[in-house]
Image: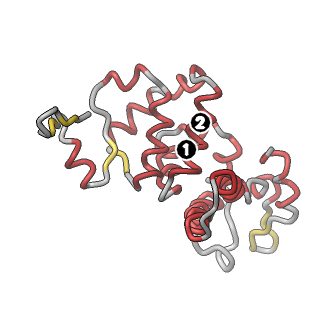
Amino acid sequence: SMFMDADGVIHDPHNGQEDLRNKTLRHTSIAFKEDSTRVLRGMRFCAQMGLTSCDETIELCKVMFDEYWNIEPDLVRAEWLKWALRSTVPSAGLRFLNSTGWVRHYPELAKMRRCPQDPDWHPEGSVWIHTQFVCDAAKQIAIRDGLNNDETIVLMFAALLHDIGKPLVTINESGRWRSPGHDMAGEEPAR
């Protein structure tokens, strides 16, 4: 919450410039709670600008958890499309969604957090962590290849959902994590 007046003077009562320099997302007042869409905007802003949220904003978003169902579906869709199109660090938005607890509104995504992978193939850890890496790489591919908006949206959601079936089929077989048929198992949840 800052503005520039007609004389070009910046008014910054909440030290927003410092937060931007520090790549910090911070709410400016308790009025943040008046619009639950702001949590999804926080996800998008984190992804768009590579921000990390301050603890106070995370806690406020947690309190707003049940307000998700008051958001119009078109607004939910719009924020996810903006995440796909405008993000520079998509994983930052996913981390925000997880830290606020709002990832639980997307149970297929939430299940990926606890789904292990074989460390020989995926030393990064869970399917959730792997998916964050894939989303960041997909965004770089979209930029590198100059994809148009429709192509970028398809690529980003393909990256986000590419392993959505793993939690449904992952097994530990002789001490090794395997996910046979996860590609087919993921078709329905992705839809």
Marks 1 and 2 sit apart, C-alpha to C-alpha, by 6 Å
- Is 176 above or below relative to 184? below
Q: Residue at x 31, y 40 (%)?
A: 26
Quadrant containing the N terminus in the rendered view: top left
Residue 122: x %, y % from top left: 65, 73
Residue 39: x %, y % from top left: 47, 34
- Is 19 above or below relative to 152? above
Q: Quadrant of residue 22?
A: bottom left
- Is 139 above or below relative to 124? above
> What amino acid type is highlighted by mark number 1?
Lys
Residue 111: x %, y % from top left: 68, 48
Q: Secondary structure at mark 2?
A: helix
The answer to whether one can see residue 190 in this image is yes
Left or right of 88: which side holds 153? right
> What amino acid type is highlighted by mark number 2?
Ala
Quadrant containing the C terminus in the rendered view: top right
Left or right of 51: which side holds 170? right
Q: Secondary structure at mark 1?
A: helix
- Is 186 above or below relative to 191? below
Q: Residue at x 69, y 67 (%)?
A: 117
Q: Are marks 1 and 2 in contact (CB under 8 Å)?
A: yes
According to the image, label 1 marks what residue? Answer: 82
According to the image, label 2 marks what residue? Answer: 78
Residue 106: x %, y % from top left: 65, 39
Q: Residue at x 86, y 54 (%)?
A: 185
